Amino acid sequence: MNIVSAFFAGLLFGVGLIVAGMANPAKVLAFLDLAGAWDPSLALVMGAAIAVGLPVFAAFGRRRASLLGEPLQIPANRTIDRRLIAGSALFGVGWGMAGICPGPAVVLLGAGVPRAVLFVAAMLAGMALFEWLEQRPARRRAPLRESTAGADSDS
Amino acid sequence: MSIDWVHFTPFTALAGGLLIGTAAALLLVLDGRIAGISGIVGGLLRPRRGELAWRLAFVAGLAVAAPLYRWFAVMPEPQLDAPTPLLLLAGLLVGLGTRYGSGCTSGHGVCGLSRRSPRSFAATLAFMAAGFATVYLLRHLLPR
């Protein structure tokens, strides 16, 4: 895996979030506040990002390997189940409370916003809690089998 | 619903979105990966072989975006108004929920919709609806 290209992609992603105003939680909350003074900006951010993504995924998504020779890892899971919906809804509740999703959280951390440290620490704790909850029943059922937790991740 | 024309920034929103889409496209085309931040960060907690370096590199890029941006331009001061207990609960729910739901605004919202995945469409509807409902509850139903 080429770490230079991964670094550059992360950097560009972060700059995009800043340019779009999405590294500002207040602006994200203004999008989520349909009943208040609504700021539709986030919808345009997603629309523009998808406008770039659609043709690229359509042209490139079925290839076996990337241009640098890495195997393409596209999620194969197509089932819409309770895990997906309940997890996403839980995420949405947290998103609505603070106006921060994982990307902007890392950008805010890098920006040196003191309270972003608290959010990122809590987010990592939530992710660790997920790992722990996923490991627990698997361990009880089959102590020696390797867990497949996270193998179906979309992201 | 009334649109806040003063704070609505269509041009920078579109420009930022184009950059985000380009970043996601680059990660796919060069590295063969989906730019889903929750998955990339979550994968750091229990890294599989050969999975650590590129994830750290991507997250590092994301983290230096703000300091680098400030070299060239003035970055508007982020406004983080949530009181601390709510901020901590929010972080916990975002971490748990995105891992449970296998993605967030980037993995499902940008990349998933870009590859026209019905699963990501359902996830995006779910977190958008929950986000709208939560803000409505906190700002308009509960007394402040």
Image (tube, coloured by chain):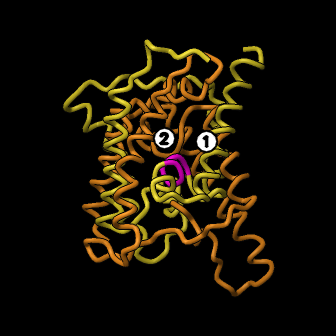
Q: The orange chain is which one?
A: A
Q: On screen, A146 above or below A91?
A: below
Residue A87 horizontal side relative to residue B109, left or right: right
Q: What is the quadrant of the N terminus of chain B in the image? A: top right
Do pointers 1 and 2 mark residues of a single chain? no
From the top left corner, tell me how far across and down residue B26 is, in percent. 30, 58
Amino acid of disc 2: Ala
- Identify which residue is drawn at 31% across, 64% down: B29
The chain drawn in yellow is B
> Please, which chain is the residue tagged with disc 1 on?
B
| Residue named by callout 2 | A105
Residue A20 place in picture, x, y as percent = 37, 32
Callout 1: SS: helix
Q: What secondary structure do most residues of the magenta stretch adopt?
A: helix
Residue depicted at x 66% and y 27%: B135
- Range of residues picked out in magenta: B104-109
> Which residue, given by chain and number where applicable, does mark 1 sit on?
B91
